[in-house]
Amino acid sequence: MSDIVLCPKCGSEFTYPSDNMTVCSQCFYEWNPEEAASASASEGKILDSNGNELQDGDSVVVIKDLPVKGAPKPVKAGTKVKNIRLRPGSDHNIDCKIDGFGSMALKSEFVKKA
């Protein structure tokens, strides 16, 4: 037995090769290890609505009106946000400060790189 391949769905170590796929004997999930390796390399990147890679310190522009809980008005489309901080692995993956609203978390799908 060479390398143990963990199931990406359930994390089980009981996997086996079947043709060009790998199968988990616990949850019966099937995947191609080559595709999974290339997908995991691009997982760490956070992309804006146009597919451009975002980095810490970038400036972005909000592309649609975003309602804010507890605020009487939404963040308007076209609002420029400077000096963003990225939070990989979370749903709202951009931390920023917006004038008139204060600190807030945004989803990268609602912004574009300025």
Image: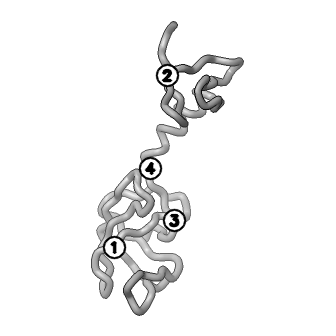
Q: Amino acid type of disc 2?
A: Glu
x and y percentages locating residue 9 in the rendered image: 54, 36
Q: Which of marks 4 and 2 is nearer the N terminus?
A: 2
Q: Mark 1 points at which residue?
A: 104
From the viewer's side, name the closer residue of 112 and 87: 87
At a point 60% along the width and 33% down the height, the residue shown is 35
Q: Name the residue under label 3.
A: 109
x and y percentages locating residue 48 in the rendered image: 49, 62
Q: Amino acid type of disc 4?
A: Lys
Q: What separation in Å lies between label 1 and label 3 (alpha carbons)?
A: 15 Å
Q: Which of marks 2 and 3 is nearer the N terminus?
A: 2
Q: What separation in Å lies between label 3 and label 4 (alpha carbons)?
A: 13 Å
Q: Nearer the viewer, mark 1 or mark 3?
A: 1
Q: Amino acid type of disc 3?
A: Glu
Disc 4 secondary structure class: loop
Is 94 placed left or right of 27 in the picture?
left
Q: Mark 2 points at which residue?
A: 13
Q: Residues within 10 Å of mark 2 (few under 14, many from 20)?
A: some
Disc number placed over residue 45 in the picture, else none: 4
